Image (tube, rainbow, N blue to C red):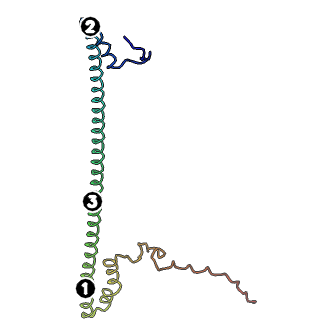
Amino acid sequence: MTTPEHDAGREPSVVEIARQWAKLDSGFLKVATAAVQPELKRVHLERMKELDNKQREREAVREAKERQAAREAKERQALREAHERQAAREAEERQAAREAQERQAERSHRLYMGGLVAGFVLCAGMLCGSVIEALNKQEVSAGILAGPTMIGVVALFVLRQRHSGSGQQQPDRASVPGQQPPSVPPAPVPTPELVEPR
């Protein structure tokens, strides 16, 4: 069946096989075709199984890639939502802090203005009282109302400072900017006394 030009390790080509079959008679061809058909079917089935397996592998790989892409997209979405929630929470905290500062500033302003009004009313009342006392020939009472008492009221209500009294503590002068702490006077040096002779 093989020609001398065939190498031992090489399969014959289709043309060579067709030439060899052409030399045989038709009865032998029918028998050979009937014998070859089961082998061809088996080879065809194996080939189809192999193609099916490759198709299944490709589909499995594609589905795995799609699942991985969906998982990554879900993780990115969750991360984006977490960032958005964090940014919204920080914005709310900044807004709450700003509103608290505004309320504190408004409360301080109201307190300061209330002190100004109260100080003005008290000073005006004390001035009116000192004038009335002076007209009634009570110069001492007028001096008390218009003197240090009125200055203390102004300092207390307007400047928010207290003067040092008997039971009050005076603020540290070193803490006030621009002022130096009071200097301590030096201790007196004892001098020897001269004893006069008798």
Rounded to the nearest angstrom, the CA distance separating label 3 from label 1 is 42 Å
> Is residue 11 found left or right of 182 in the rendered image?
left
- Viewer-nearest of discs 3 and 1: 3
What is the number of the mark on residue 169?
A: none
Label 2 to label 1: alpha-carbon separation: 144 Å
Q: Residue at the spot x=28%, y=69% of the render?
A: 105
Write down the residue under mark 3: 96
Task: Please name whichever residue, 62 or 32, is drawn nearer the observer in this view of the structure.
Answer: 32
Numbered mark located on residue 25 in the image = 2
Q: Position of residue 132 (x, y in %)?
A: 23, 90
In the rendered view, would you say 8 is above or below 195? above
**Which of disc 1 and disc 2 is earlier in sequence?**
2
**Disc 2 residue crowd, few under 14, some 14–19, many 20+, Cα 10 Å:** few
Which residue is located at x 27 percent, y 54 percent? 88
Question: What kind of element bears circle 3?
Answer: helix
Q: Earlier in the sequence, mark 3 or mark 1?
A: 3
- In screen coordinates, is 188 left or right of 54? right
Residue 119 at x, y percent in the picture = 28, 80
Q: Which quarter of the figure is the C terminus placed in?
A: bottom right
Task: Identify the disc placed on residue 124.
Answer: 1
Mark sitting earlier along the chain (2/3): 2
Q: What kind of element bears circle 1? A: helix
Q: Quadrant of residue 117?
A: bottom left
